[in-house]
Amino acid sequence: MSARDEILNRIRTANGPTPAAVPIPRDYATTGAYATGAPELLDLLADRLHDYRAAVHRCTPDELAATLAELTRGWRVAVPEPLTVPGAVPDRPTLSHADLDGVDAVLTGCAAACADTGTIVLDAGAGQGRRALTLIPDRHVCVIHAEQVVQTVPELLRRLDPSRPLTLISGPSATSDIELDRVEGVHGPRTLIVVIVDGGVPAGPIVSTGSRG
């Protein structure tokens, strides 16, 4: 039987009086080889993010405040509560889309990240803010803690609440036309800066109080 005949036969069967349920193979990997927080897992995530042209920085929890202050030095940075850095512009309902377009960057945390695909997920939780906050400014600085990183997509999905507004980010916003000319910044930030924090998630929200020095 040719591939064409097989396709047509499946269509006839599916449209017939007693369509057969085709078994769906689910033998794909549902767990990764690395434990959450393993150095190899963080290295894999950093490698994927580099492939997507994101800038990646590594630090410890004790270095986080100073790292964020240095990365955002001289910028007006929109931040969701309770985050703060020098030059912070707190996100409030009165901060319009035009106001967000006028800031230099946005700083957020995340809900989880997948190392295999280099994907970061936001769910509007604490330290992440509304969706517009991370789609309008031209730069996005995102903090990922080691305990938020898993290896596979199934592990990632198990960490997410589908009832929340999920935004999946795999590198800076980019698109290509029919001639494969790449254009960045069309659907979101042109620049993605990721800070991977080795050492887990702190007990409280991510707050940077570092000075510019």
Image (spheres, helix red, strand yellow):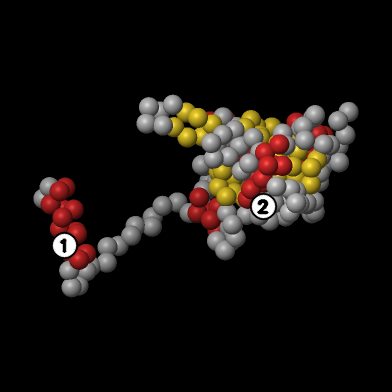
Q: State the separation of the CA atoms marked 2 and 1.
A: 47 Å
- Write the residue at 54% across / 31% down: 184
Please give the label number shown on residue 130: 2
- Write the residue at 51% across / 34% down: 174
In the image, residue 210 lies at what x, y percent?
Answer: 86, 37
Q: Nearer the viewer, residue 29 or 110?
A: 110
Mark 2 and mark 1 lie on one chain; the one further toward the N terminus is 1
Please give the label number shown on residue 4: none
Quarter of the rendering containing residue 189: top right
- Write the residue at 12% across / 47% down: 2
Query: In the rendered view of the protein, which quadrant contains the C terminus?
Result: top right
Residue 131 in sight from this viewpoint: yes
Which element is circle 1 on? helix
Q: Look at mark 1 in the image and give the residue it sits on.
A: 12
Residue extending farthest bottom? 17
Q: Would residue 145 appear left or right of 172 to someone viewing this image?
A: right
- Write the residue at 22% across / 69% down: 19
Q: Nearer the viewer, residue 173 or 23?
A: 173
Crowding around mark 1 (Cα neighbors within 10 Å: few <14, some 14 to 19, many 20+) is: few
When the figure is inspected, residue 202 is found, relative to residue 107, above or below; the finding is below
When the figure is inspected, residue 52 is found, relative to residue 31, above or below; the finding is above
In the image, residue 78 lies at what x, y percent?
Answer: 74, 42
Q: Amino acid at mark 1?
A: Arg
Q: Would residue 9 appear left or right of 79 to someone viewing this image?
A: left
The mark total stands at 2
In the image, residue 154 lies at what x, y percent?
Answer: 50, 54
Which element is circle 2 on? loop
